[in-house]
Image (tube, rainbow, N blue to C red):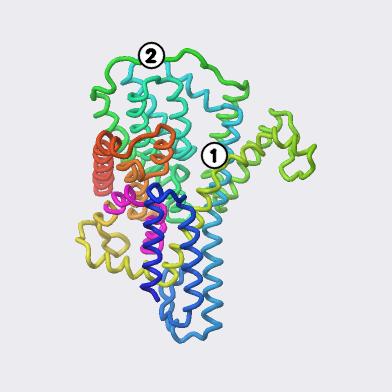
Amino acid sequence: METLLVVIFVIGYLAITLEHNLKIDKLIPALAMMAILWALMAFGIDGFTTWFDSGNHALLENFGAFGHEEKMELMEETLLHHLGKTAEILVFLLGAMTIVEIIDYFDGFATIKSFVKTRSKKKILWIFSFLAFILSAIIDNLTATIVLISILQKIVKDREVRLWYAGLIIVAANAGGAWSPIGDVTTTMLWIGDKVSTAMLIEHLLIPSLVCMLVPSFIASYLPAFKGEIDVDEEDGGTNSKYGPRMLYLGLAAIVFVPIFKTVTHLPPYVGMMLSLAVVATFAEIYSNKKIAISSINQESDEHSHHSPVHSALTKIELPSILFFLGILMAVAALESLGLLFNFAEGLKQGMPLIGTEMAGTQVSDLVVVLLGIGSAIIDNVPLVAASLGMFSEPMDDQLWHFIAYSAGTGGSMLIIGSAAGVVAMGMEKIDFFWYLKKISWLAFLGFIAGAICFMVMRYLF
């Protein structure tokens, strides 16, 4: 039965990876895989001899001797446990997405365009690289990419030149998302899962992530594509709403407040995100002078709700991504519950070359984590990190978790399909897979390796 479950997971994984070839949204195989795996586990529960206790991160003793009812009760408890952990991530993401959409409702991101005062291609490259690096750490790498490419389309008229900028924005955004607990879904997973703390994550990954951004940008600045000047479109220079800048700064401050709230209260991050959303939504409603009518069902109120910034934001958040995360995280949880990921991790530790350092009494190979980063360029990094959560039992803020956060967050830049930022840029600018492979991938690879080396050097020195 275990073999069948692994085969189903692999097939579902392939369907997710090949979504562009199959022309099927990846949320469909993710949800189907989740449901089938848990259903098969329910049908074959009596045949399983091992069960993984996620709370204690260890296999249960004598699970095979448990009765049918006892096993079913344990499975239901485990399912509820994983659903709760997954819901924490999803509710957090929903709150962050809604705040970003509220900012966009007031055209707040147009304020960023005012930062670009030059025509030099090289200077514009550095401006957008640093904007992507900083902005992605606050509003996540996916949203930062969307915002910056939208601004880029208004500034750079030549599409060929714009593709180069878009490629470097992807690299910078993924690098920026790696060192912030709210900058990338995978880092958020590690943060919410109490594997990393905000202060230690920033301390260990800020410099390696910065190196990962600086190396490709520095090399690219000497390429022919970034020589000379561009024709800047002088029109459409201002924001459409007088509240745009105010909502931009309020929204960004509200998101940055979340890690502070968690540190002070020790409550789960989604609680702080809901508080931040409530504050931003309140100001949004005041500025829009419209009634709050999210749950109204009558036509008159519906007309008001149509113009409500909160209601408008809620209709624009990307629910397919939320459902995909639900499916993939719960599917990985199924394999974790049977102890398959735990056993796989033990095999990796014994079979891989041990070039790492001793961590919490266990030698973990750096090569495994680097391969995870390279693998995240080919397949989605969310299930890879979800799998690592079930594989390794190192304590909070262990160097392993920081290295995983870096590798999974930045490794996806090596292919256009390797990260959410890359996929959305691919859609916005119709970037060809092989164009990116030839022009940008080698830059992303050099940045990834440079940052990884920087992380290892810092680990040995400090």
Task: Report the disc number at residue 293.
Answer: none
Q: Residue 378: say if magenta.
A: yes
Which one is nearer the viewer's eye here, 20 or 81? 20
Q: Amino acid at mark 2?
A: Asp
Which one is nearer the viewer's eye here, 248 or 237? 237
Looking at this view, name the residue that lies furthest to the front. 22
Q: Which residues are magenta?
A: 371-396
Residue 357 lies, in percent from the top left, at 24, 57
Q: Main secondary structure of the magenta part?
A: helix
Label 2 or label 1, whichever comes before in sequence order? 2
Q: Are marks 2 and 1 in contact (CB under 8 Å)?
A: no
Label 2 and label 1: CA atoms lie apart by 35 Å
Q: Is residue 352 left or right of residue 229?
A: left
Q: Is residue 153 above or below residue 383?
A: above
Q: Residue at point 49% right, 85% down?
A: 66
Q: Residue at point 25% right, 47% down?
A: 456
Which one is nearer the viewer's eye here, 40 or 117? 40
Q: Amino acid at mark 1?
A: Ile
Residue 211 lies, in percent from the top left, at 29, 36
Residue 404 lies, in percent from the top left, at 34, 52
Which quadrant does the N terminus fall into?
Answer: bottom left
Which residue is denoted by mark 2 in the rendering? 231
